[in-house]
Image (tube, helix red, strand yellow):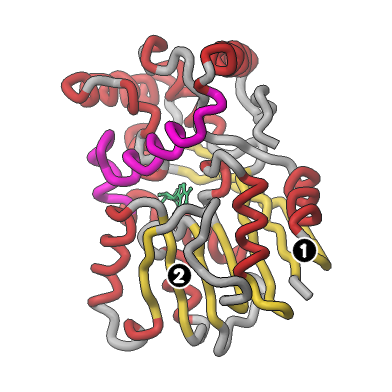
Amino acid sequence: MNNLFWTGKLSSPMRILINSNNILAWLTGNLRNKKAMKDRIRLGYNATFSRHVTNYDELAGEFQERAADYQFYGIDLQGKEVLDIGGGTGVASLIALEMGAAKVVCGDISEYMLERGREKVRTLATGSDRIEFCQLDAESLPFNNNSFDFVMTGMAFGLFPDQKKAVKEMYRVLRPGGSVSLGAHGPEHYWEAIDTNLRAINKKYVLGYRLDFWPRTEKQIHLLMKDAGFKDIRTNRFIWRNLFKTPTDACDFFAAVTANWWFAKVPENKREQEYKKTQKFYERRNIIQVTDDIIVANGMKY
Ligand SMILES: C[S@@+](CC[C@H](N)C(=O)[O-])C[C@H]1O[C@@H](n2cnc3c(N)ncnc32)[C@H](O)[C@@H]1O
């Protein structure tokens, strides 16, 4: 599943660049170093590479809520115990709480993101006793078998280096009779922003390491879920265009939502300069539209 070649929608020079770079990453062993990939992602969402993550909810919250709404469509969470994997600042978890879940666990690899979620929960008038935040790795969940009635992951799946393992873990912690909602990134997801960022960044900072984001097709997600043991699998693909007031708004949204883990290899004293270069690129190309492409897969465990 963790294929070498990028098949998402990008202009062909960018696809050629990513694919040649992944061959280089494979030859040097970086492609197989899943721990390093996870560390980059975790550090990114701990706000190590980008000041934008500190404004995650302001810059990206409403867009992530929209994606969460697609995942909750037609789902009844009344009285259910819910696990939200890669839940970040709790955007989807808080919706689950409003939908009447008896208990919600928001789990994420980044302690920084979880702390932002805890801050929000402290201001709630009711329900704060029904939600908790837990640091975890999607590929090795710290829960017993059959612990939750509803397990979900949203806007995070493309960042898990071993997606097969992550889906198996979702199945393991789900109770028989429980349901799953897996929101994966489709082939067109954020392609305008990925394309622009890759053009702008100094290539020496990405040379030889894998791009830590993988879009998937509905068929691939269906197969992953089937292999893990899920039944009654249904997949739907939702595509929409996010329009921003200015190219800088689009650039800042993308910096926040990806925590700029692109900048993992950029020396600290060069990060602001690299960001400014990227921002100018957005302005020059007048990028005010960023596509969301999500694959929502639902299934059951019997
Ligand atoms: C784009 S954010 C989405 C957060 C949230 N689901 C939302 O919709 O706002 C991606 C999240 O996935 C988390 N993440 C990435 N890899 C992870 C892993 N292996 N295990 C758990 N969380 C992970 C990141 O820390 C980050 O908070």
- Residue 7 spot, x, y in % from top left: 69, 27
Q: Secondary structure at mark 2?
A: helix
Circle number at residue 230:
1
From the viewer's perspective, is 288 left or right of 273? right
The answer to if 242 sits in the magenta stretch is: no
- Residue placed under numbered mark 2 in the picture: 93
Q: Position of residue 161 (x, y in %)?
A: 55, 39
- Tell me, yes or no, whether the two marked residues, 2 and 1, touch with CB atoms within 8 Å: no
Query: How many discs mark residues in the rendered view?
Result: 2
Give the residue type at disc 1: Phe
Q: CA distance from mark 2 to mark 1?
A: 22 Å
Of residues 268 and 235, the one drawn nearer to the viewer in this rendering: 268
Q: Mark 2 is on which residue type?
A: Ser
Q: Residue at x 61, y 59 (%)?
A: 169
Furthest residue in direction right, as rendered: 232
Quarter of the rendering occupied by the N terminus: top right
**Residue 231 appearing in the image:** yes
Placement of 138 over or under 107, stated as above or below: above
Q: Quadrant of the C terminus?
A: bottom right
Query: Residues in magenta?
Result: 31-56
Q: Is residue 14 left or right of residue 285?
A: right
- Secondary structure at badge 1 equals loop
Q: Is residue 50 magenta?
A: yes
Q: Quadrant of residue 185?
A: top right
